Image: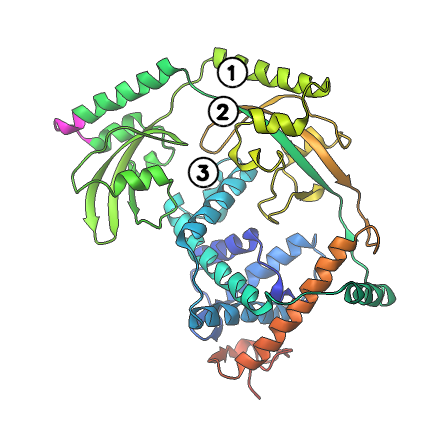
Amino acid sequence: MKLTYVSVAFGFMIGILSAQEKVKIDGVATVIGKNIVLDSEVEAFKLELLQQSDGKSDISDCEMLEQIMNRKLLAHHAVIDSIVVSEAEISANVQRKVSYFSQQLGSPEKMLEYYGFDSMKDLNAELADVEREAMYINKMQQKLTSEIDITPEEVKRYYKSLEESGNLPEFGADIELAQIVINVNPSPEEEARILARLNEIRDQVINGESFSMKAILYSDDPGVSQNSGLYTITRQSPFVKEFKEAAFSLDEGEISEPFKSDFGYHILIVEKVKGKERDVRHLLLQPEIDQKELDQAKDSLTKIREDILKQKITFEEAVLKYTDDKDTKLNKGFLINPMSSDTHFELTRMDPELYARVSNLKPGEFSEVFYDETQQQQKMYKFLVLKSKTESHVADLSRDYVKIKDLALQKKKAEAVDKWATEKIVDTYIKINDKYEGCTFEGNWRKL
């Protein structure tokens, strides 16, 4: 199947950004409508394919360039066709993926260092642009293929063609996991202490003391050392809802009352209003959790686990009744893979720490209760259950019918997109750098 219909992985998207950020002089490979393809983008695509194929990809630079050109063609015509993408959805996707990769790399600071950005503000802004283009591409694909379906007979013919040509795919080992989570929350006394401290700082700033200095001295925001708590935001910026609501409810020079978000408790001041943008400075305090709260949460979850094992309650019932995780509560506890948006995790691509906790489990078995915390430093205890495990194997029609059907349907949709691209290339402005004059493309990109 061609790559024109395959969604680009977040690693590729961020790889492009990293390449563009680090390469000072970058050549233009092609121009498709109003979209530019840089040489560094082709290189980033190559690196991503090599990573995904464990270094076994033999696709040429010319083939990679054509796949990228196909994507740019989709993005260009999505704008022409007035396809709408939601800024709120863009922000949510960026936040979800940044959180995932921050956890993979250890911290937001390590993520910034790894990808060569100076601040999360810069990284989020660039990622929002890339995510926006990806959404245009996906929505254009959906528009072109929404009515395409496939019959069982077509699935059988597709499988037979792969079998006869010796190209049956090998499906890697994957697992499905579910969890129950108990958050560890600060005591009411600690929350009251934090609010009192913020109100004290707020009064001091109102009476003339420096908000910037207070942020440097006291804020728990890890980015405060870089910007003294100052951010330029719009209503579409990827900040939590409570932060934006506070920022856009104030006039220039006003300071907010303390407010709560998933990160802790804040106060902020609007330093400047610039049209749809606002320069705001904030100070974040995170309540401390003492050992008593930690022990209580662990004991509570251990008791829930024991009750499930003793069949006093089912796992699914316990999820609905007890878990504090909003993302999995209504999904029977199943974890969603942020890369594929389904419940399956490839063992070779799992976080090593998570893999170590579940690698020896059999389907239906539970991990021990263990401590964890989110990027927002929400502390919690959780345990996992291995819901299913599939060993790596060569595709089999009866065993893997759903996966094979998906591949066959993707191929059929890709062919429809390719047919559309053939027609659209004719009336789209296209310029290809002389560097690629030796390339032979499947599409008539040179309009010969």
The residue labelled by disc 1 is 294
Please report whichever mark, 3 or 1, sits nearer to the chain's N-terminal start.
3
Is residue 58 shown to the viewer in this render?
A: no
Q: Nearer the viewer, residue 105 or 320?
A: 320
Element on which disc 2 rests: strand
Amino acid residing under circle 1: Leu
Extreme residue in the top direction: 292
Residue located farthest toward the left when viewing the structure as drawn: 207
Q: Is residue 213 left or right of residue 111?
A: left
Q: Residues within 10 Å of mark 2 (few under 14, many from 20)?
A: some
In this view, the residue farthest toward the right is 164
Q: Which mark is residue 379?
A: 2
Label 3: state its secondary structure.
helix
Residue 166 appears left or right of 136: right
Q: Position of residue 9 (x, y in %)?
A: 58, 54
Give the x, y percent position of residue 380: 53, 24
Please report the bounds of the magenta region as a residue range: 204-210
Q: CA distance from mark 1 to mark 2?
A: 9 Å
The local crowd at label 3, few if under 14, some if 14 to 19, many if 20 or more residues have their Cα within 10 Å, is some
* Amino acid type at mark 3: Glu
Q: Is residue 377 above or below residue 139?
A: above
Residue 341 is a magenta residue: no
Q: Nearer the viewer, residue 45 or 180?
A: 180
- Estimate the spatial distance between the alpha carbons at disc 2 and disc 3, rounded to whole Å: 19 Å
